[in-house]
Amino acid sequence: MHFVVLGGGPAGTQAAMDAARLGVEVTLVERDVIGGATDMWDCIPSKAMIATGGAMSFLDRSDGMGLAPVRPHLDLERLRQRIGSITSRLGRATETILTSQDVRLLRGEGRLAGPHTVVAETADGPVELEGDAILLSTGSRPRVPDWAPVDGDRVLVTRDAYPPKELPRHLVVIGSGVTGVEFVHMFSSLGSEVTLVVSRQQVLPSKDPEVAAVLEENFLRRGVKLMKGARAVAVERTGDGVAVRCDDGRAATGSHALLAIGSLPNSESLALHTAGVVVDAHGYVPVNHHCQTNVPHIYAAGDLSGKLPLSSVASMQGRKIAEHVVVGHTVAHRHLNYDKAASAIFTEPEIADVGLAEADAFAEGRKIRVTKVPFAATAKALINDDARGFVKIVSDPATGVVLGGSIVGQHAAELISVIALAVTAGLRVQDIVESMLVHPTLSEALADAAE
């Protein structure tokens, strides 16, 4: 059996590695970077910059730890080198694992040329591949509307900002979703003045209002300007700055503007029609619970599939696809449940959630039990001089089964794994309560919230 994978992001590399381990011949075609452009050009660099900003913020408030205040200075070139070093090391490590599993790597752009045929345009010319199974995992790119003249200089998309050519004096961020608020946090931590254009009446409109309120309070304390109820409709260059015009007549001015208004799937160059693969009106490739397209031996995963745009989800899709390609037709395996995927936002404080949200339960008229504990009641939070945020757990009042939860505070992205495990495994709140956790730790708040 020959398995051809188009796209070397989290979904593609995981599927290739797992299928190769199961004895399948695998060829992986990647045009940009092993590890995936979204991960290596967006996610990893942004988190590296956030870590640097976090270090600066910690030093800036070091007097709370009994130290003399320190005013750190950002070295933009050293930060650029640090990001390059991290992504290079991760890319090399992924490539080493793939080659050690005898996965054949082809550098080039792949497209379908029939139901079982892939053509990879490489530097040495086209290479034709015949695949018994094919995975499409070509990812996505930042969305750029017609009204935004992106130039990589003053008007930026996310991939222009890791880091930018110069630290913005005043950055106007357009978009108040996950990516937008992470950029607000990142650049305000690094010393930029920031204005956030918020099209709704709260940042993170899809999140719990209590969670959004904590983040908004932190932004305002830092001096971030929130322009609420304003939808950007134009970006103009104004000499050495920019002006972002909104639909209500207001304008936000600054030295730079950054677009964080979603992404577009990379499907238009795949020649999907040659294999009869269906694509929806937005360019995504619909899949079933096995990640199969309408053509059963052709799979789609990651951002291209239109499911949750998370690297963790893409990797799990890759694992399930490899299983299905090899033994899925004869052995039953557990399907992915996207409703149980944990997610995090790397702001300060961090935000993480999983499973059923309180607001969604109320909207459905579902009976739930909600318990909430502030970190201010946790010894470790006081020791760390950061008691912001809370732990909230949603459970079934009749059975005690954990249905979901959210965490706002230090290390929320790490702590949510306990609730995620409980949701996935169908554990009860009592199982968390009876876990003898280390003292003093932030995780004690989980047990307190479960009581």
Image: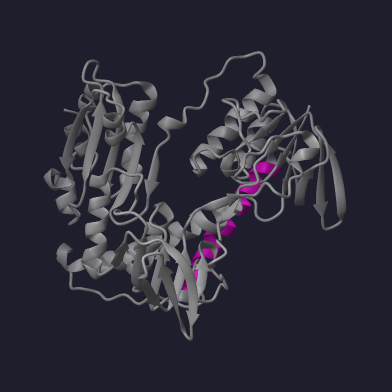
The C terminus: image quadrant: top left
Looking at the picture, how far across and down is residue 361, in whole percent? 29, 29
Looking at the picture, how far across and down is residue 201, in whole percent? 29, 54
Looking at the picture, how far across and down is residue 163, in whole percent? 49, 69
Looking at the picture, how far across and down is residue 379, in whole percent? 14, 46
Q: Is residue 64 left or right of residue 195?
A: left
Is 78 above or below relative to 385?
A: below
User: Which residue shows up at 56% across the image and 25% down it?
Assistant: 289
Residue 231 located within the stretch drawn in magenta = no
Residue 81 located within the stretch drawn in magenta = yes
Q: Is residue 136 left or right of residue 354?
A: right
Q: Is residue 120 left or right of residue 356?
A: right
Q: Which sits in the foreground, 199 or 167?
A: 199
Magenta span main SS: helix
Residue 253 visible to an observer of this rendering: yes
Q: Which sits in the foreground, 203 or 230?
A: 230
User: Which residue shows up at 78% across the image and 35% down it?
Assistant: 275
Q: Residue furthest front?
A: 248
Q: Which residues are magenta?
A: 77-99
Q: Which sits in the foreground, 218 or 11?
A: 218
Is 332 above or below relative to 385?
A: above
